[in-house]
Image (cartoon, grey):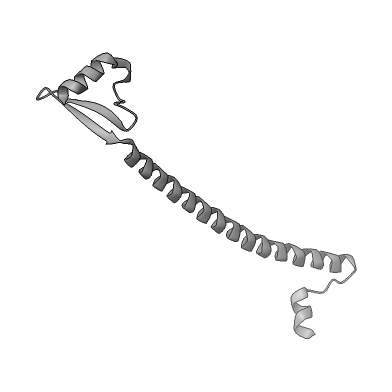
Amino acid sequence: MEQKIEAYIGENPEDASVLNKEYILKEASMEKVDWKIYYFIDRNTISEQIYSIIFSTIIVVLICVGLTLVVIGVLSRVIGQRILQLRDQAERIANGDLQNPSSHNRHG
């Protein structure tokens, strides 16, 4: 097996990381013991893992976008109601109603 690997790498030095369309070959060296380690990685295994990661990422992104839209909706309603109350009070003052709104609500 090692001879086949070395022959392939010898023939294709620029593409030593690709063994064929089904597997990827990676080489590592251990300098202390002068060994070469070859890793065979199945492309289908990598593809399955990548699809799983992409799917999980998309789900997390959609959940985050949904939560963000809910928070934006709640905040806009709260802020919008306060702005409308301020506008109503400004209109009352513009029409000459100078009573304190809190005392006005207590008496009637």
Say if residue 30 shows up in the picture: no
- Quadrant location of the C terminus? bottom right
Q: Residue at x 24, y 33 (%)?
A: 40
Say if residue 85 shows up in the picture: yes
Q: Quadrant of residue 67?
A: bottom right
- Quadrant location of the N terminus? top left
Asked if 79 appears above or below 47 in the picture, the reply is: below
Q: Give the side of residue 54 with respect to residue 70, left or right.
A: left
Please tell me which residue lies in front, 64 or 83: 64
| Residue 107 image position (x, y, % from top left) | 78, 85
Q: Residue at x 44, y 45 (%)?
A: 54
| Residue 86 image position (x, y, % from top left) | 76, 64
Q: Residue at x 32, y 16 (%)?
A: 14
Q: How many numbered markers are drawn?
A: 0
| Residue 31 image position (x, y, % from top left) | 14, 23
Asked if 11 appears above or below 64 in the picture, the reply is: above
| Residue 16 image position (x, y, % from top left) | 29, 21
Task: List the single residue furthest toward the right.
Answer: 95
Q: Give the side of residue 42 with respect to residue 104, left or right.
A: left
Please tell me which residue lies in front, 88 or 78: 78
